[in-house]
Amino acid sequence: MPLRRPYSGGPKNPEIPIRTASLALVIAAAPLLACRSTVAVVATPAMPVAALPGETHLRNVQQLTHGGNNAEAYFSRSGRQLIFQRQEDLTAGCDQEYVMNIDGSGVHRVSNGLGRTTCGYFYDNDKRILYSSTFEHDAACPVRPDMSKGYVWPLGHFEIYAARSDGTELTKLTDDKAYNAEATVSPDGKRIIFTSTRDGDIDLYSMNIDGSDVRRITSRVGYDGGAFYSPNGKQIVWRASYPATAADTADYRGLLAQRLVRPAALEIWVANADGSEPRQVTKLGGANFAPFFTHDGKRIIFTSNHLDPKGRNFDLFLVNVDGTGLEQVTFDPDFDGFPMFSPDGKKLVWASNRNAKTRGETNLFIADWAK
């Protein structure tokens, strides 16, 4: 949902989407790309890694990937597979979507290898996947933003696509040339929640699984993104950054006009699934993102750099949905982020710079969750 990919010294580039309601285009969408041959990757078997001191919630830690940038790994409904985005070469190319088994085997690419992809997700009892891509706008990797403006994220030309779980029968669900991304699916498989700039701001929207019945569910000026449903489907959790002053608003709108956003200040929010009764959960300062509910829906795990004055060290934290009971989960001195629990709540997957062989590489780790 974005802050979608880590980098050496901060959170991952999200590349945020938004969707307008061209239902005729959505309903008439035909398969766009055969993609019939998935691309296998020579994978190293999962490797045991010791949990760090203080990481009492983590047991039987396994490193699943070995090299490159790997992030935003999300469990299948069965809990036996993961979909994730991967940049194989730290110095070239850009993210594509991959699927693998939770033991690190069977790694294969399910996107078409063009443009940049982000935010993969399983649905329809693991028979189908969602992800966002820029490939129809430009088959090349998007140009990186000008960092003379500070640390900013590009709001690229992303559209949301659906496909069979092997990558075939690719179908376009959004078509408005805005930013449409960070899509996840409700527990009952009926609705997609996603981020879009279609109406001129960065807001959350929901739609039916076929792309119809698009509803805007946030409206406050500022960035809303990276949303997930609660296990019972009655609530949503997301990251948000709202301008506090007139100068902040001017800076936000100026960057937005250039398809950019500055994600330095993000807090965690919850609301009812339709966006009603929004409530701020964290007031920590810094960048707090990638939230996900625990299996019982009573707590939220998320990524934060609020303990580091320089803002470079990100760890995982737990907090009650009412904002109390903050607890640190990981203690690596670099980056830990993008956590997700398995459907049964027994395992946690996340991305980390720990155990890196090359500076800046981000790998995926899985552990048994100890309450």
Image (cartoon, rainbow, N blue to C red):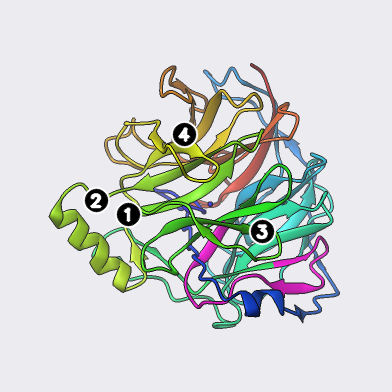
From the image, tell me which residue sits under label 2: 243
Local SS, label 3: strand
From the image, tell me which residue sits under label 4: 315
Instruction: Report crowding for label 3: few under 14, some 14 to 19, many 20 or more residues within 10 A (C-alpha).
Output: some
Q: Distance between the residues labelled 4 and 1?
A: 25 Å
Label 4 or label 2, whichever lies nearer to me, is: 2
Q: Nearer the viewer, residue 325 or 83?
A: 325
Q: How far apart are marks 4 and 3 (CA)?
A: 34 Å
The magenta stretch is 162-182
Q: Does the magenta stretch include residue 168?
A: yes
Local SS, label 2: loop
| Left-right relation of 102 to 306 | right
Q: Distance between the residues labelled 1 and 2?
A: 6 Å
Three-letter amino acid code of the residue under disc 3: Asn
Mark 3 or mark 1: which comes first in sequence?
A: 3
Quarter of the figure that contains the C terminus: top right
Q: How far apart are marks 3 and 1 (CA)?
A: 25 Å
Label 2 or label 3, whichever lies nearer to me, is: 3
Instruction: Report crowding for label 1: few under 14, some 14 to 19, many 20 or more residues within 10 A (C-alpha).
Output: many
Can residue 313 be seen in the rendering of this structure? no
Figure quadrant of residue 59: top right
Q: Position of residue 254 (x, y in %)?
A: 24, 68
Q: Where is residue 38 in the image (x, y as percent from the top left)?
A: 82, 69
Instruction: Report crowding for label 2: few under 14, some 14 to 19, many 20 or more residues within 10 A (C-alpha).
Output: some
Label 4 or label 1, whichever lies nearer to me, is: 1
From the image, tell me which residue sits under label 1: 222
Local SS, label 4: strand
Three-letter amino acid code of the residue under disc 4: Asp
